[in-house]
Image: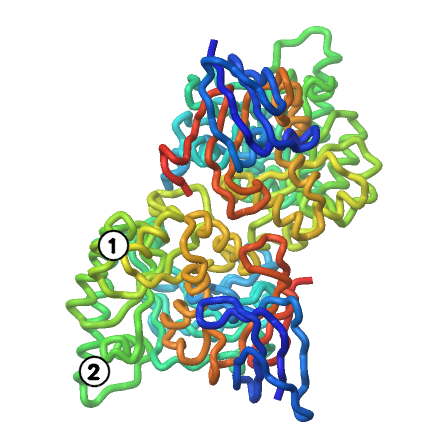
Amino acid sequence: MMKLLIKNGIVHPVTSNSFTGDILIEDGKIKGIEPGICCDGAQIIDANGLNVYPGIIEEHSHIGIHGEKTNQQSDNDVNEWSDPVTPECHALEGIKPFDHGFLDALNAGVTTFNVYPGSANPIGGIGVTLKNDPSLHFEEKILVRDSGLKMAMGENPKKTHSTISKKIMTRMGTAQVIRRAFQDAINYRNKKEKEKNPKMEILLRVLDGDLTAHVHAHKADDILTIIRIQEEFGFKMCLEHATESHLIADVLAGKNIKLAIGPMFTARYKIEVNNRSLKTPSILEKAGITDFCLITDHPVIPINNLPIEASMAVSNGLSKDLALRSITINPAKNLGIDDRVGSLEIGKDADIVICDREVLDPTHRVMFTVVNGKVAYDMEKEGLIL
Amino acid sequence: MKLFKNGYVWHNSEIRKADFTVEDGKFVKIEAEIVPSQLCETIDFSGKYVYPGMVDAHTHVGIFEECTGWTAGDDVNETSSPATPGMRAIDAINPLDPGIESARNSGFTTVCVLPGSANVIGGEGVVIKTAGTVVDKMVVHTEKKIIKLAFGWNPVWFWGSQDKSPKTRLAVSALLREKLTAAKNYMKKEEKEYDYDMENLSALLKKEAIARIHVANLEDIETIGRVAKEFDFDYVLDHATALHTNPEFAKSLEVPVILGPLNVAGKSFQTYDLTFNSVKILHDAGLKLSVMTDAPVIPLNLAKIQMWLIDRLRMDRADIIDMFTINPAAVLGLDKKIGSIEEGKDADFFVSTGDIFDYTTKIEHTYIEGIRVGGEE
C-alpha cells in the first residue's frame, strides 16, 4: 500500500477552513487531514512553511489538440471545420498525449484539465476531462470521457463558415444552424423506422440532459441568444468565456446557467472582446453569482496564468475565498467531478499542489505537484520550469 | 514648481522615503526631506510608492490598435514588398488607441513603436510618450534612427506561403545583403535622386541608425552577427528566444538584448526554446537585459505579470525593475533622459498603493513630465 504524508503544511482545503497540519494519502486517496498525523513507512513531504492546496482544475483548454512546438496545420486538430455541425467529433481523438501542454499544466499545479474542440463550429464536438498523471497511459488519464458538447456563438463560427463552408453569413445564421440541428434531433427521435445517426444520438443526449452544452459566447447579445435557444429546447448549459457577462449579471443571476470566465489576459484583438474587464469576476460575485470558474483556454494564454487570473480578479475586487474556489472546486462542480477532485477532503483523490507562497501571490513557486497520491513534479529535483 | 512629499521613492535601486520637486517637466531635487515653500504646489504621497515610469522598447501600440476588430486598426506590416526600409511607424500611429491608454494607466510612460516582422526590412520605428492626441507632440527624439529588421520564420512563413521570396532563411540574409549593397552604391554616387529606402539603409551603414532585429533561433542570431560584421552596422537583438541556450556566445556578441514576450503559450516552431528561465541564465552570464511585451501581443496593463513571473526566479528585484525601466531606456539611447527618478531627467513616474511586486497593489496615478495623465481605476 503506497502511503504519502505531507507534514506541517499550511493546508487550504478550500471547502473548509485553513489550518497548519498534515495530510495522509493512501493508494491515491486522501485518508487523513488534520494536525499531528503519524504514519510508519510513509514517504514524507516536509511542507513546513509551505502552502498546500487541492490540485488546480482547468475547465477549458485545448491542451494536446492544438499541437504545441510546431507551426504546422498538420498538428493542429482543434476545429473540424468541414461542416458547421460536427457533434460526433471527439476531442479525445485529436489529442497528442506527449504534447508539451501536459507538462506546462503539471509545473503550474494543474492536476485535472478539460479539453474541448475549438469554436469555429456552432456545434463543434465532445470534450474530455483528463487527469494530468504522468505515470498513467493516455487512456487511463481519462476522468470523464464525454465531458460536454462544445458549441459556439459569435465571431468565430461566422468568420470561419462565411469563408469556408459558406453555410453561415450572420449571427442569425449561427442561431438557426443550432435550432435546426436540435429540431433535426427531435424529428429523428420521433421517426419509427430509422438508421442510427451518430450526430443525432449526441444531440439527443444533450436534449435529455445527459450531456451539458458548453457554449463559447463572448458578447451579451450572443449570450442572450443562446439562452433563448436553450430555453426553447431545455438543455443544460455552461457559458464559456462569457466576456460581457458582467454587463448582464442581473439577468444571469436569475438563471440556472453555469459560467466559465476567461481567458482574462488577451488583448482586445477582436470586437467581441472589446469589453474584456478584470472586474468581471467581482461584478458577478456582487450580483450573487458565486459558482463560476476561471479558464485560460490554453494555449490562448499560458495555463500557469490560471491562478494569476484569480489574483488579478482579487486585486479588482473579488473575494479571496471565491478566487480560490474559481480554480478548484467550482471548475470541478462545473464538470461534475466534485466528488473526486477540487478540494482536500477525506476520500477524495490526492491531487495536491504545494507552493512556497500563497497560490494567489503570483510570485509563488510550485514546489510539488501530487497527482493520484504520487509526486509528479518536484521543483527541487527537476528545477523551476517556467 | 511642484513638491511631491512623503512617498516611498524608487531611487538609486532602492525604495526609501523621499520628497522630490518637479519643474518644467523635469525632476529638480530628490531628498530625504524638502521643506515646502510658498511658491510650491505640494502633493502628498503619504504611504504611497513612487516608481520611475516604465519603458517598453518593443511594442506595436498605436499601429496595431485594440478594439478595432481583426484588421481595421492593423498597420503593422506593409507587406507590399519584403523590404520596405522607407516606411515609418509614426505615419500609422493612432494616439487614441485604447492600448496606449492602457499603457499610461499601467505606469508605462515611454514606448518604442516598431513595424512588424513579416518583412526582412520593415521600416523605421519611433519612440513616443504615452499621453497625447497628436503623435508628433508625443515623439521622443532619439539620436539614432531605429530600423526594424526580421530574421527567421516570420518573413519565411509570410512570403514563402505566398510562393514568393524569401522562402528560406537563405533568401532572408541574401535580400538584406542585396539591399545594404545597394545602399553602399547609393552612398558612393555623387549625383543621385533622393531615395527614402536608400537613405534609411545608408543611415544604418553610417551608424546614424541602429537595427532592431526580430529573431528567435540561434542559427539566425549567428547569421545576423555575420551580416552585421560584413556591413559594419549596430544592432539590437529583439525576442532572442533561443539566446540562453548558449550564454557564452550571447555574452560574446556584446549587443543589447530585449527578451520577450515571455508570458505566451502554444510554443511554436520558432519559439520552441521560449522560457522565463532565459532571463536568469542571460542575466547571470552578465548581459544587461530588457523585457518587452510586444504589445498588444501582451497588453501593457498586463506587463506586470511578466514582472511577477520573472520574480519566481528569485533574482534581485532591483535588477528586475531595471529590465522594465532604465535598461530599455538605454537600448533606445535615452538613459540620460528617462528610465529612473534622477535630478534633471523627465519627471515620468507612477504612484502606487504598495510594492509593485505585490499583486494587490494598484497604480493610482501616472505622471508624464510632471503632469498626471492616468492611473488604474
| Horizontal side, residue B228 vs residue A16: left or right | left
x 72%, y 13%: residue: A189
Instruction: Work out which quarter of the rendered image holds the C terminus of chain A and state it.
Output: top left
Query: CA gap, disc 1 to disc 2?
Result: 28 Å
Q: Is residue A378 above or below residue B254?
A: above
User: Residue beneath label 2, please?
Assistant: B187
Q: Is residue B141 above or below residue B59?
A: below
Chain bearing tag 1 is B
Image quadrant in which you'd find residue B358: bottom right
Q: Secondary structure at mark 2?
A: helix
**At label 1, which amino acid type do we have?**
Asp
Q: Within the image, what quadrant is residue B323 found in? A: bottom left
Disc 2 residue type (three-letter): Met
Q: Residues within 10 Å of mark 2 (few under 14, many from 20)?
A: some
Mark toward the start of the polypeptide (1 vs 2)? 2
- Asked if B308 appears above or below A230 in the picture, the reply is below
Query: What label does residue B285 carry, if any?
Result: none
- Residues B118 and A190: in front is B118
Crowding near pointer 1: few (<14 within 10 Å), some, many (20+)?
many
Identify the residue at image location x=35%, y=52%.
Answer: B280
For the residues tagged 1 and 2, is the chain the same?
yes
Please provide percent x and percent y for residue B220: 25, 54
Q: Position of residue A82 (x, y in %)?
A: 52, 32
| Residue depicted at x 67% and y 35% | A325
Q: Can residue B163 be seen at all in this image of the molecule? A: no
Q: Position of residue A182 (x, y in %)?
A: 71, 25
* Mark drawn on residue B220: 1
Relative height, residue A235 to residue A385 (above, below): above
Tell me the element at label 1. helix
Q: Is residue A178 visible?
A: yes
Residue shown at the point (51%, 34%) measured from the top left = A48
Disc 1 + disc 2, Cβ < 8 Å: no
